[in-house]
Image (tube, helix red, strand yellow):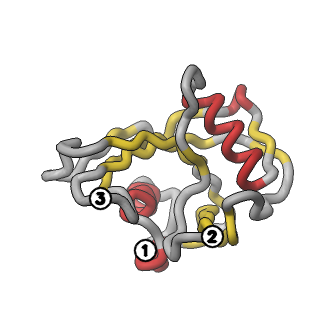
Amino acid sequence: MDVEQRPAGTAPAGRLIEKVAWIRLENGRVLTARTHDRPAFYLPGGKPEAGESREEALVREITEELGVTLDPATIAHAVTVEAAADGKAAGTVVRMVCFTAEGTGAPVPDGEIAEVAWLGPEDRDRVSAATAMVLDELVATGLLPRA
């Protein structure tokens, strides 16, 4: 599933926000999280800090948000998508670089995370545009069942 997608018409014309995200699949569902201030669910992750690699940011963000410790040796790029950034000014694009990784610990909302949910393709109306694109890719590659 090592694919980079950019839908037609989504060239980064405005501000570009880069985020890293963790794809965790279980029983035909993908782990998502919702922050306290937003109604949409997202793949868990966040923005790299200055001087931090994408992989380092992923490990840090998942520990902070969910209390799960990722094994850095198992981190693998899965897909990169670009979409209009949810809740941001028009023209703002989010580039979400998604990884798979093995982790220890049960995901529990922490910090800015209000709740976690295991969602599937039928839940596209509950997720951000970038997360919906990842759900579509997971269906296309057979990793998630069709809605």
Few, some or many C-alpha atoms within 10 Å of disc 1 (few <14, some 14-19, many ≥20)?
A: some
Give SS at disc 1: helix
Residue at (29, 59) in percent of width and height: 89
Residue 39 appears in the rendering: yes
- Is 56 drawn above or below residue 106 in the view shown? above
In the figure, 18 relative to 41: above or below?
above
x and y percentages locating residue 35 in the rendered image: 61, 66
Residue 89, numbered label: 3
The kind of residue on which mark 3 rests is Ala
Left or right relative to 65: residue 55: left
Q: Which residue is mark 1?
A: 124
Percent position of residue 77, x then y: 51, 35
Alpha carbons under labels 3 and 2: distance apart: 20 Å
First in sequence: mark 1 vs mark 3: 3
Mark 1 and mark 3: Cα distance apart in space: 22 Å
Q: Which mark is residue 36?
A: 2
Q: Is residue 124 left or right of residue 111?
A: left
Give the position of the C terminus as an image quadrant. Answer: bottom left
- Quick one: label 2, few (<14), some, or many (20+) residues within 10 Å? few
Question: Marks 2 and 1, Cα distance to the nearest angstrom?
Answer: 20 Å
Residue flagged by tag 1: what amino acid is it? Arg
Q: Is residue 1 visible?
A: no
Q: Residue at x 59, y 24 (%)?
A: 52
Check contact, mark 1 vs mark 3: CB within 8 A.
no
Give how far across and how far down residue 72 sits, in percent: 71, 29
- Give the structural element (helix, strand or loop) at label 2: loop
Q: Quadrant of the N terminus?
A: top left
Q: Residues within 10 Å of mark 3 (few under 14, many from 20)?
A: few
* Residue 58 image offset from top left, x and y in percent: 63, 38
Q: Nearer the viewer, residue 111 or 105?
A: 111
Query: What residue is drawn where x is 36% and y is 57%?
Result: 85
